[in-house]
Amino acid sequence: VLEAILLAAAAQPQDQLNKVVSARGGRELKWLIRGDEQVASIEVITDKNTKNTIELERPVGNLNQVKIKQGEAPAQRQLRHAVSFDPSSPKVVPLSVSMVDTDVSKVNDPNYLQNLYTRAVQLGRRSLPQEIVSAIIDGAQGIEILTEHSNPIIHIVFPDGSVPISLVGDGIQRVLRIALELASRQAGTVLLEEPEVYQHPGAIRQTSKVILASVRRDMQVILSTHSLEFIDAILNEATPEDLTLTSIYRMQLLKGVLRTSRLTGDEAKFARTQIEDDLR
């Protein structure tokens, strides 16, 4: 679902398609479209009544080629996936949507986290990652960019020294990555897939605080989760105003049909605190 939103909202969906396939291990494109069907349609409607619609079409006899049909075409480029545009479709309005991969080990740029931290500081949000680190690592005072052999490295700072971020656990690295990703953005929509993975309860609570702080800055955060503990953390940290901006969608795929139900933030809070309903 998150990847579908990313594809339909992007100005250049073919670029995002390459990223989606690569993130899934570079497997054949045939898995993007269910079964033996030839076409998959994606539609994203915003609260401003703009509508983006794209179609992924699989040519007959070619399982590893997908054509993307959308609105009026920007300049086309030579890409490894075939791309075509349907001129009869309404003009696509590109939205500010990005997918965040919280797995730090997949970052190819050695300066990626340092650049995120720099942008967060430039936007006046230095305190957010500092507070997160202090809250989840006993005795830590925050983070700083130090150098090793003239290379900038983020360090966790303690009263008696510091250690590189690479030496702390995966869960701590993930929550810090999420904090930096959100703090370094001005606005728009951010997609997070299971942000609670590898995190202990304290880190899960801090992740929920980071997400809510971003929503209060008018950022939209759409996330997927299988963790009831993470849902509870979001609901417990949310203010009454936060709950008015929160929705939980429960999804079930039955014989090829995706069925959904929606709970408002207040309904979800009641379901968890009063009747202890499993909202996963």
Image: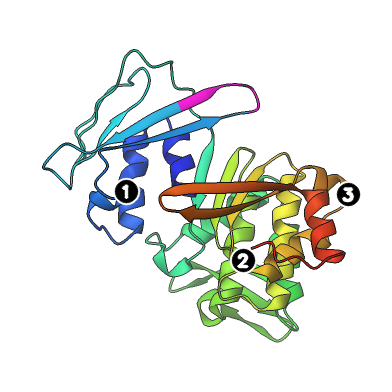
For badge 3, the amino acid type reads Pro
- Which secondary structure, mark 2? helix
- Which secondary structure, mark 3? helix
- Which secondary structure, mark 1? helix
Residue extending furthest top?
A: 88
**Up-down: is 223 above or below 227?**
above
**Up-down: is 110 above or below 92?**
below
Indicate the quadrant containing the C terminus: top left, top right, bottom left or bottom right. Answer: bottom right
Tell me, yes or no, whether the two marked residues, 1 and 3, touch with CB atoms within 8 Å: no
Q: Which residue is mark 2?
A: 176
Q: Is residue 51 within the magenta segment?
A: yes
Query: Nearer the N terminus, badge 2 or badge 1?
Result: 1
Q: Position of residue 90 (x, y in %)?
A: 43, 15
Q: Is residue 44 within the magenta segment?
A: no
Q: Position of residue 277 (x, y in %)?
A: 75, 65
Q: Which residue is mark 1?
A: 32
The part of the chain drawn in magenta is: 47-52
For badge 2, the amino acid type reads Leu
Q: Tell me the mark number nearer the camera, choosing from 1 and 3.
A: 1
Query: Nearer the N terminus, badge 1 or badge 3?
Result: 1
Q: Quadrant of residue 116?
A: bottom right
Q: Which residue is mark 3?
A: 240
Residue 4 appears left or right of 63: right
On the question of residue 211 being in view, the answer is yes
Most prominent secondary structure in the magenta stretch?
A: loop
